[in-house]
Image (cartoon, rainbow, N blue to C red):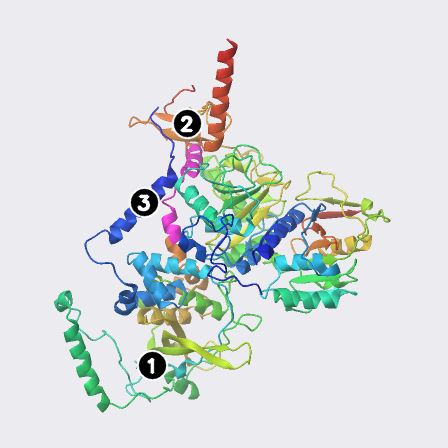
Amino acid sequence: MDEGMHRNQKNYRRLLDAMSCPGRIVRLEIPDGHASIGAALAVGQCLLDSEVSVCVIGNGDAPALQSTLAAVTHVRTAPLAKADFIFICAGQSLGGARLAWRGRSEAPEEGATLVYCHDFVRTGSSDHLRIRLSGPGIARQEGIVPEMSGIPLEEFRELLAVNADYPLGVDVFFVRPNGEVMGLARATRIQVR
Amino acid sequence: MGYVAVKGGAAAIDNAAIFALHRRAGGPSSPLETAQIREQLHFAVDRVMGEGSLYAPDLAALAFKQAAGDTFEAAFILRAYRTTLPRLGYSQPIATDGMRAIRRISAAFKEIPGGQILGPTADYSLRLLNFDLQEESPERTQQMIAQLLKEIPHAKPLPRRFPKVVAMLRREGLLIARKPVAGNNGDPADVTRQALSFPAPRSARLQTLARGETGGLLALAYSNMRGYGSIHPVIGELRVGFLPVLFKNPINGLLESIGEILVTEAEVIARIGDDQGPAMFSLGYGLCFGHNETKAIAMAVLDRAMSGQAPEVPSEDQEFVLTHVDGIESMGFCNHYKLPHYVTFQSELDRLRKIQNDPRPEEDTCP
Amino acid sequence: MPLTTAMPTQPNLPSTHWRAGMPSARKRYSYAFLDEGAKREIRRKLLKAVAIPGCQVSFGSREMPIARGWGTGGLQLTLSLIGPDDVLKVIDQGSDDSVNAVNIKKFVRNVTGVPLTTDTRVATLIQTRHRIPEEPLHANQLLVFQVPIPEPLRLVEPSERKTRRMHAEADYSRMWLYLYEDIVRFNEITVGARYPVMVNGRHLMDPSPIPRWDVARLNQSEALLLFCAGREKRIYAIPAHTDVEPLSFEDFAFRVENFHGHCCSRCGCAGSFLDEVIVDESGRRTFICSDTAYCEKMRRRGAAADAAQEENR
């Protein structure tokens, strides 16, 4: 029990790093024996329990991830538009992000957290060079290029639209199966060139 | 240089704790047993459980002993302990008409079905110091109890359940219809998990009041009864008794009673209202752990007071009431002013001197 | 669900275990005191607070074994964040040795076994009441502020319902008006500590009762700054490299405390926030650094320099 507890603590600190320094990659410790969904599960173990709800969408791994999250964390399931957490087993949400709950003007923090669980390819695409991230947590005024490559440009455009009504919006983690995580806060300014 | 920095804080804290122990237990009398507190100071124990928000008579007695009789402090110790306990599940709602009552009265009607049951109360005894208690004789106490029990068999046994007085009024259409107490999603709110937001659902209001400090509730309710408000309550029914705690067995899904809790319940009937439709009585509800009639009645009055649309006096303003009745919070904040504030004060001094055109303090030059 | 039990699962714990060395009664409590469910809730809320800099996020504040108003908010954050790799520093009014700081430190060490330090540079996690350490913080440090009153608008509006609305609409006109009226009346802004700041150009925030000296240092900080009010049940945060501006007018600029050229009578340093100390009944004053660890460091540095000079002579 102590081992899982300490792993969750360590992983949480990395998720906190990721959310407070958007665009930077951190690396999670992955629990053994869960194949390709291990990294997503590590995020789930850190943040989910019966007090919150999740919706898992996407391809291949989605059913397995949904049942494992429910079994391990006792998280409730909810429809996309009401879920506190949305796990997306794909590189793109295909419109899913637009349906996510963005909070109320008196409680913007209710907005959902999106967790993309996908093997965003490291090379091949140079699309990420066209992205500039700036704002809180980012030192350079002129902005930085996201450290994680392989996230489709359309998805950045999608998130830009979803978070246009700041402080309403959603916050995002991109999770690779190897445990690499990059965060995007809703306060992060995204420019697509 | 007459100044020595505050060092050695750790030793001072340790010593202060031992001084406090000395103050509580350093005298010649024999140490209090928690069983004595639980049995003989039961009102204190009940109050600590209610304000500490944890039904645990033995632990409440221990907290009361540790706090040397300070109910604020004892409730605080119990709540801090509560923080460390995992939540294993949720008990089922209980209908209070099935309460195993030890006391049940109504001020609204002379006779009520099931009868007025006085039970244990000091309401009608003269508040004269009983000097016999200085040399309490267990034999004499036993004798009096034996005498009482000898006479009791001639009385009828209590019914298993008492009908609710307010239910009868409700059937006659004299009471405003009950409103659901739940929050937006249909479940009762949980003020220990979700900070209050306003307007608060009634379930959150009732929970906050049930955990509230007896004196705080009383002061606010009294302000309303006395004149800063318009609730002139009639006690429809006041009950003290035991309720079963029902829990769904996770294996076979059956409801099981896992124990009993002693509670006090008050239903007050308040002035005629015609806010929504025809004129009717309205109801205020109070329920708290243990035997604490003052708290239950004050809670019921405040529940009713806060149910109006536009608050006109402090006790009708739910934000005002709910954010100020918690004893652990108010006591903590009041006492935090004992902590050093010299940085803050320095900052204020700087402002004041600036406004008064810089009369500088007498100086001690730089080394 | 992995439930924490009130009793230890192993009767004989190895001595390297975090529980080792605690008085027996303390063994009844789990690592970092809070149960895992409480930590998870605070962790979730803190991520949201970081994502919306300066926005107050409400949470189900737990009762702690120290009183409400004595740092229960900061303590809950510290306990939700802390792990075996951390080194903890706790200060109160700048001092590592004040009774409340000592009390909190002792408690956290007892329930976690983490090492303690007074050295700002060595600490990974710093809990503070009313000060920011003088030495510059770095990117791998977390600074946790204890907050008594998280709502900057409380000064002008007692109702939570109304202040929520004002934040939702970014309507801070009443705060501006308050400062303006202050100037009309006193020819000066009279707000001492707890000076309201605008975070990321959107949320008005209470920086906790730090002096204005420290308010200026919130802007574009290197470290992540976390704030928690236990009694009022609010968490908020300022990520590193975030714009934080104290409210001010063009002709009435925000100014930090002026020490009129005084310097610390212990270490001789002239660039730190000073405590004014009354030396005797005649009211004679002296000044010393409010940050005691920094003062000690400067004093040792000064002594070493003197010694070196002596040797060279």
Q: Which residue is mark 2?
A: C287
Which residue shows up at 41% across the image and 70% down it?
B303
Tell me where residue A117 sits by quadrant.
bottom right
Asked if disc 2 and disc 3 are in contact, CB closer than 8 Å, the reply is no
Q: Which residue is mark 3?
A: B16
Q: How far, Cα to Cα, is label 2 from label 3?
A: 29 Å
Q: Looking at numbered disc 1 in the image, what kind of residue is underneath it?
A: Ala
Q: In the figure, is residue A159 to the left or right of A106?
A: right
Tell me where residue C3 sits by quadrant.
bottom right
Tell me whether marks 2 and 3 sit on the same chain. Answer: no
Chain letter of the residue beneath label 2 in the structure image: C
Which residue shows up at 57% across the image and 70% down it?
B184
Q: Looking at numbered disc 2 in the image, what kind of residue is underneath it?
A: Phe
Helix, strand or loop status at disc 1: strand
User: In the rendered structure, which segment of residues is drawn in magenta?
Assistant: B332-351
Q: Is label 3 or label 1 in front?
A: 3
Q: Nearer the viewer, residue C3 or B288?
A: C3
Which label number is shown at residue B101?
A: 1
Q: How far, Cα to Cα, is label 2 from label 1?
A: 67 Å
Chain letter of the residue beneath label 1 in the structure image: B
Helix, strand or loop status at disc 2: strand
Asked if the stretch drawn in magenta spans residue C137, the answer is no
Number of other residues with Cα within 10 Å of mark 1, as a class: few under 14, some 14 to 19, many 20 or more: many
Q: Is label 2 or label 3 in front?
A: 3
